[in-house]
Image: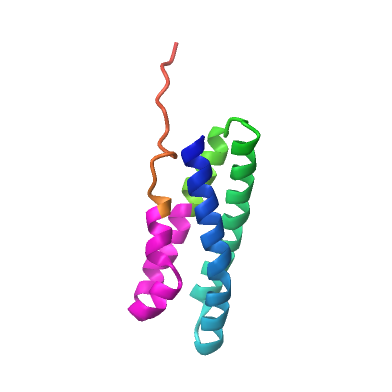
Amino acid sequence: MNQCKKVCHELGTLCHNTQNRVISLMCEKDDCKYLGDYLQQLKVMEVLCNYMCVCCCEMENLTQSTISEFKNKCKMLVKSCGIMSKKLSSDELTKLNCDKIKKLCDNTFVKTKKTKKR
């Protein structure tokens, strides 16, 4: 649970802090639908991470569906970073925290446990 809370807190804060950077870049770009998609994904991930942190603080078990949703949202963020890497400079990608987000999304706490069937 501690690792979960640490990762979720860090990722949620990073998503929150990146949103204004995305909006600023959207003002500079003409065709920026991909930035709008990324912004929306950041907002969703921020809220999901906040929820997961509350669950960790309250010592509630995270359901498999919550962990699955986290993995899915991470995949979407990483995919958006891949799309942006083809359209933006490396400096712009750094400002949008793509590498940091990828690193946090590739963490150990979301590995699923195999259960025996009876």
Q: Position of residue 66 (x, y in %)?
A: 57, 40
Rendered residue at 53%/75% (across/down): 22
- Image location (x, y in percent) of residue 53: 60, 44
Magenta segment, which residues?
74-103
Is 77 situated above or below 25?
above
Q: Is residue 116 magenta?
A: no
Res. 80 in view = yes
Magenta segment's dominant SS is: helix
The structure's colour scheme is: rainbow
Query: Residue 39 falls in which quadrant of the image?
Result: bottom right
The residue that appears at 42% across and 21% down in the rendered structure is 115
Residue that appears at 50% across and 55% down? 11
Tell me the quadrant of the picture where the C terminus can be found: top left
Q: Residue 50 at what x, y percent from top left?
A: 62, 50
Would you say 116 lies left or right of 50 here?
left
In the image, is 59 to the left or to the right of 105?
right
Q: What is the number of callouts on the image? A: 0
* Front-lying residue, 34 or 58: 58
Q: Is residue 93 magenta?
A: yes
The relative height of residue 50 versus residue 26 in the rendered view (above or below) is: above
Q: Nearer the viewer, residue 66 or 97?
A: 97
